[in-house]
Amino acid sequence: MGAFYTLSMLADGEPRGLVGARIQSVALQQRIAGHPLDDIVIHATNADGSQATLEIQAKRTLTFTASDAEFVDVVGQVWQAAQKPAFETERYETAVAISRTTTRIEQAVQEVLNWARQLPDAATFASNIRRKGFASDAMRSFVAVFADNLARHGAPNDNQTVWRLLRRFQVLVFDFEAVGSEYTHRARERCRFVLATDQAHAQAIFGRTLSSTQKSLRKQAAPEAGPRSSESYRPKRGFGSGMPSIWVA
């Protein structure tokens, strides 16, 4: 998934989860740098020039239920991220990335997150969630689980806090492991755009190279490890000069 975001950066594309922004850097394993959801951290610039950040925790799958211990941890990480001053003053998003979705996730979890973003305040959100025949039982269950998980971490779980965190939280599904994966196809196509014209046929090789390089960077993600740039892909792998020189932390 880090390779997917790096491809977006190299193609000067929009990062998934930050609509309208342009990626400035993609960083991996950033807990030591103060990012609770540390698997992937995207720093970007909005259309108006202001800063945007997206913290992503990667999980194979989550159920988002009361028995989901991993979701307890994710909610705690979201709460920690929300303590940063930037969470109030900038566009600061949190997300969990999963490889498999379910009907519950699509019809309950994603719908709740959409409502949290669209509704103007916590009171309206809470009222709509409570309303029988308007919100589903599964939606109410997800909100209750999120609130309970906040309490497990000693965080407040009043309506205002729950709404404030949910409207900055995203569930991003990347189906890379599925047969005929749509995102694998998108990545291969994007490789064509970042390669020199005479090397577009090598998109599969470039994709594997980028992925393996990301894994190597993940292993080297100590604080003393310096930034790497797309320049490092050229001499070793023989890719052309059509790639921009963009830093990858």
Image: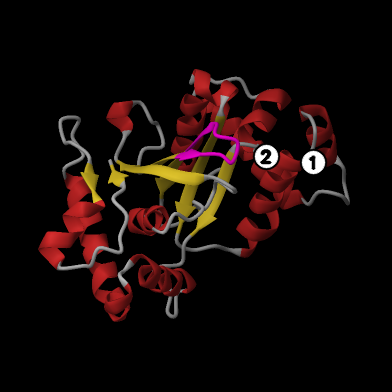
Q: Residue at x 49, y 46 (%)?
A: 22
Amino acid type, label 2: Val
Q: Earlier in the sequence, mark 1 or mark 2?
A: 1
- Find residue 160 and report its horizontal and vertical position in percent: 71, 24
Q: Look at the image and tell me in which quarter the N terminus lies.
A: bottom left
Callouts 1 and 2 close, C-beta under 8 Å: yes
Left or right: 97 as drawn, with respect to 106: left
Asked which quadrant contains residue 24, the reply is top left
Amino acid type, label 1: Ile
- Find residue 191 and report its horizontal and vertical position in percent: 36, 69
Q: Which mark is residue 143?
A: 2
Query: Tag 1: Cα neighbours inside 10 Å, few (<14), some, or many (≥20)?
Result: many
Q: Residue at x 65, y 52 (%)?
A: 110
> Mark 1 and mark 2: span between their CA atoms?
8 Å
Query: Tag 2: Cα neighbours inside 10 Å, few (<14), some, or many (≥20)?
Result: many
Q: Is residue 48 magenta?
A: yes
Q: Look at the image and tell me in which quarter the C terminus lies.
A: top left
Q: Residue at x 61, y 32 (%)?
A: 165
Is 109 drawn above or below residue 235 in the view shown? above
Left or right: 57 as drawn, with respect to 163: left
* Element type where label 1 sits in the image: helix
Q: Is residue 143 magenta?
A: no
Foreground of the two, 26 or 40: 26
User: Is any part of residue 224 visible from this angle?
Assistant: yes
- Find residue 225 and report its horizontal and vertical position in percent: 16, 36
Q: Which residues are magenta?
A: 44-53
Q: Residue at x 65, y 44 (%)?
A: 142
Residue identified by numbered label 1: 129
User: Is any part of residue 154 visible from this angle?
Assistant: no
